[in-house]
Image (cartoon, rainbow, N blue to C red):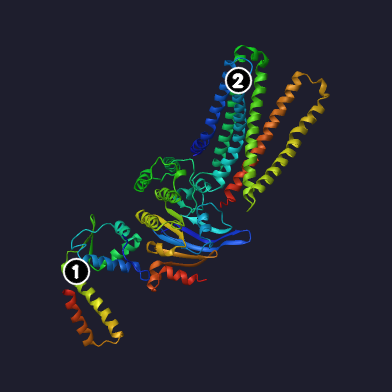
Amino acid sequence: MNPILECNGLTKTFGPKKALSDINLKIGQGQIVGLLGPNGSGKTTLIKIATALLTPSSGEIQISGMKPGLGTKKIVSYLPEKNYLNDWMRVRDIIGMFKDFYEDFSPEKACDMLKRLNISADDRLKTLSKGTKEKVQLILVMSREAKLYLLDEPIGGVDPAARDYILETIIGNYNPEATVLISTHLIYDVEKILDHVIFINEGRLVLSSSVDEIREQGESVDGLFREVFRC
Amino acid sequence: MPWELKPDRPIYAQLVEHIVQMILSGVYPPGSKLPSVRDLAKEASVNPNTMQRALAMLEEDGLIITHRTSGRSITEDSEMIRKTRTRIARDQVSEFLEKMQKLGFEKEEILSIITEMIKEVRG
Amino acid sequence: MLGKLIKYELKATGRTFLPLYAALLVFAAVTKLTYLLSDSGDNIPAVISLILYIIILTGMFVMTFVVMIQRFYKNLLSDEGYLMFTLPVETWKHITSKLLVSVIWNIGSIAAAILSIVILSIDDIISGEMKTELSIDIAGSTTALALFELILACIAGMVFGILIIYASIAWGHLSKRHRIMASIGAFLALATFSQIMFFCFTVMPVAKALQERGDILYIGLDRSLTIYHWFMWILIAFLVILSALFFAITNYVLNRELNLE
């Protein structure tokens, strides 16, 4: 089976700083993968390159066999850390916009999820709380039938109940033809739903392993992480 | 409500135990239908792949049967269930005995403590 | 996809401009009415209305300029860029949609201004006074062509002005900090470059042509028209070529050197 995401010698420099050094990895379909590392380790850089928001300095990256571009944008669903919603729109408008631009977007699914959270389609995005806006973004992202979901810190800065909701949504949305890549530094909460983890530090790949392999050594991923990244 | 899962053991193994417990305690009686993999995974708050793996193991062990068209159900083979029940009991006891012996207890001591405490439980 | 981008761009900006246009026309009408309905002498309401009208008029043109910059910067290069650039749409379509909508509002503002002036002088127009003043000698197709060239040049000038700003913002985006300063610097560089090019390729050839064709004082109507046509088309070509250059710069930066915070 073709890997959904493949990197070969991927490097990204910003001036003198090497954000990513020689990353080699392969991620298959139907996996929920954790991209784990401390802040500033290169997780967001890697994700941005996969979404074509940044261009690599050297090396290559392929998504479903394609270089990041128009074709990959159609099959990649990205949830950034930031809030990217246009202020002036109502919930209804942003759903319409996703429907207009993404063939794989399901407005029914989105509306259903919004209703369960008591978010009305007529609400102005400007008036929503930060937490609610994040949930709206998550719903928009998960309402697409994408091949690769890239979630950058989806549970950081969110209350525990919301965190559970987010993890449930990710599980409930699971599809054996799609892969979910979750980047986070909050490993404990997210461990149980991961198939595979990638540790990254200072732009380098430190470890790539299935969660079962780690636990069979009698250790949690969280525990291993603390060991590996001990200050 | 997510199931109780320890962080330092493989999840699929814990899921197997959890489901067996549910079978033995009657939450999933013999012959009853199991929810879909995805629903179970959601309930347990785990990765559907992991849940799938656990169910596959249970199927190998014969506790779960997959029907081509109607999903999974618990076996109706009561002999099988009884055997599993016994096996789990023996596992628990042997773990307990090992621990007690490590603490330096003799067999007669262990037995007398158990006999005493069991009376209290029933009462 | 381009159409959809234009739709959303119009939606985002229409909320600003349409009320402004309405307010402009309303105050023009109010000014006119308060002027007509009162006796000559102290006409405070009309004066107030006129002042408000002028404020709105100025504000409208300022907004046209500000919104053009703000839409480009905010929607593409700040947080909203995370949404826009992950849409499965080519970069040039983003630039084009914003360009087109900016041109639309530029034309719209001019049209609104003209309409408001018509309202302010409606009685003079009706009575035919303005007509005589504004009457143009319609000499047939030559004047129509000249007018067409003028309008084309104005639109080309608009496009040029918008694209030089986009290119400056994009170029400025390349610097890590002080992006605003960098953009201003880029603008000065591009503007200077444009001026030099303008001089070399527009003014000089025309001046040279005038020289070759003899003393400027003896140029009759025919010849000055030809020179006018010639100059206009060179000007339009110049504006189009530089616009294409600025478009290419903007497109390149947004495609390969994007670096959203």
Q: Position of residue C75 (x, y in %)?
A: 54, 43
SS label for mark 1? helix
Image mark for residue C120: 2
SS label for mark 2? helix
Give me the chain letter of mark 2: C
Front: mark 2 or 1? 2
Q: List the single residue furthest toward the front.
A: C42
Q: Real-space Cα distance between discs 2 and 1?
A: 94 Å
Is C147 located above or below residue B76 in the figure?
Answer: above
Is C152 located above or below residue B107 in the figure?
Answer: above
Question: Which kind of residue does numbered mark 2 sit on?
Answer: Leu
Query: In the rendered image, is residue C48 in sight?
Result: yes
Left or right: residue B73 compared with residue C209: left
Q: Residue B42 occupies which quadrant of the picture?
A: bottom left
**Number of residues whose C-alpha sits closer than 10 Å to that of mark 1, classed few (under 14), some (14–19) or many (20 or more):** some
Q: Residue at x 64, y 32 (%)?
A: C156
Image mark for residue A97: none
Question: Which kind of residue does numbered mark 1 sit on?
Answer: Ile
Q: Residue at x 53, y 27 (%)?
A: C22
Q: Residue B104 occupies which quadrant of the picture?
A: bottom left
Q: Position of residue C146 (x, y in %)?
A: 67, 23
